[in-house]
């Protein structure tokens, strides 16, 4: 049973526009959420995180929104750049367990 | 710069073989993790360790064991490899708290024939 779901396996966006990646989760204890980005043939790299005491965290072009009542997380990238093309994983730390989503492959078209 | 290295990028083993995957980090991190990544399933946590000789089961520990004899090294062991353990294996480390950023190695692609 998938604890963290990323229902869109892929997303294409024009350069300069907004990319929105979504993530839904099931468990709810002490919650901490992270987004990782993965390029082919490399390990994932950390992008941005948010704890459950917040509903928004922003870092440059990246903003993560947390809707606890809906158990929904989203990552906004604006403006999107071709270098953002990668697979994005959301991760949920609940209790002392990590659950990662299945990933969304983002393609930013120049 | 944090560096997490994994002993092999590609590995081919036969069913029933004992397989060791090694991971080393050079930043004195307390926590180390082993994941596997499979299409359609994302990353799944196999085991993690928060201190030398300490280990905790992740989501899918069955068929695996781990060893952490030294702080910088975390080994994943497949006692008797099976074809359903063909996967990409990723090691990661983080400083102290579990919520802290994990730094990943490049991965080992294991094929079990």
Image: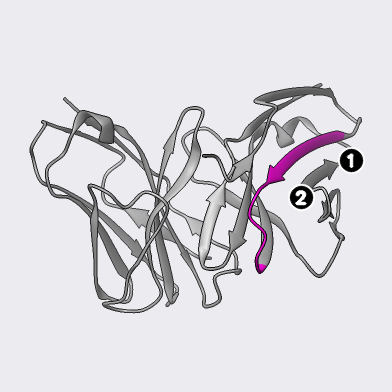
Counting other residues with Cα less than 10 Å from the Cα at mark 1, is it few (<14), some (14-19), or many (20 or more)? some
Determine whether the residue tagged by mark 2 lies in a helix, strand or loop: loop
| Residue B73 x/y as whole percent | 29, 67
Residue occupying image coordinates x 69% and y 31%? A85
Above/below status of B51 relative to B66? below
Q: Earlier in the sequence, mark 1 or mark 2?
A: 2
Q: Does the magenta run of residues contain A23? A: yes
Instruction: Locate the C terminus of chain A and report the quarter of the image it occupies.
Output: top right
Tell me if B76 is positioned left or right of A69 in this view.
left
Q: Viewer-proximal residue, A101 or A3?
A: A3
Tell me if A47 is positioned left or right of A65 in this view.
left
Marks 1, 2: nearer the viewer: 2
Q: Mark 2 points at which residue?
A: A71
Q: Does the magenta run of residues contain A40? A: no
Q: Residue B20 carries which label?
A: none
Q: Which chain carries label 1?
A: A
Tell me if B13 is positioned left or right of A4 in this view.
left
The number of callouts visible is 2
Tell me if A13 is positioned left or right of A84 in this view.
right
| Residue A15 x/y as whole percent | 86, 27
Q: Magenta segment range?
A: A19-30
Above/below status of B98 relative to A38? below
Q: Which mark is residue A78?
A: 1
Residue occupying image coordinates x 52% and y 78%? B96
| Same subunit, tags 1 and 2 | yes
| Residue B14 x/y as whole percent | 10, 31
Residue occupying image coordinates x 52% and y 32%? A40
Above/below status of B5 relative to B13? below
Determine whether the residue tagged by mark 1 lies in a helix, strand or loop: loop
Q: Quadrant of residue B98?
A: bottom right
Are the residues flagged by discs 1 and 2 in contact, CB closer than 8 Å? no
């Amino acid at each position: 049973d998938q604890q963290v779901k990323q229902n869109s396996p892929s997303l294409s966006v024009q350069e300069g526009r907004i990319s929105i990646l979504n993530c839904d989760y099931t468990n709810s204890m002490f919650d901490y959420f992270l987004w990782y980005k993965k390029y082919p043939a490399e390990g994932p790299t950390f992008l941005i995180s948010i704890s459950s005491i917040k509903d928004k965290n922003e870092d440059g072009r990246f903003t993560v929104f947390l809707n606890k009542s809906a158990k929904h997380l989203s990552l906004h990238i604006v403006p999107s750049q071709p270098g953002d093309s990668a697979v994005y994983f959301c991760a949920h730390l609940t209790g002392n367990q990590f659950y990662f989503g299945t990933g969304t492959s983002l393609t930013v078209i120049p | 710069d944090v560096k997490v290295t994994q002993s092999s990028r590609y590995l081919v083993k036969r069913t029933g073989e004992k397989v060791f995957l090694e991971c080393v980090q050079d930043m004195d991190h307390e926590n180390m993790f082993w994941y596997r990544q499979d299409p359609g399933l994302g990353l799944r946590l196999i085991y993690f360790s928060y201190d030398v000789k300490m280990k905790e089961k992740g989501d899918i520990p069955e068929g695996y064991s781990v060893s952490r004899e030294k702080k910088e090294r975390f080994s994943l062991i497949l006692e008797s490899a099976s074809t359903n353990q063909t996967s990409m294996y990723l090691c990661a480390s983080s400083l102290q708290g579990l919520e802290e950023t994990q730094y990943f190695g490049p991965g080992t692609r294991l094929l079990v024939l």
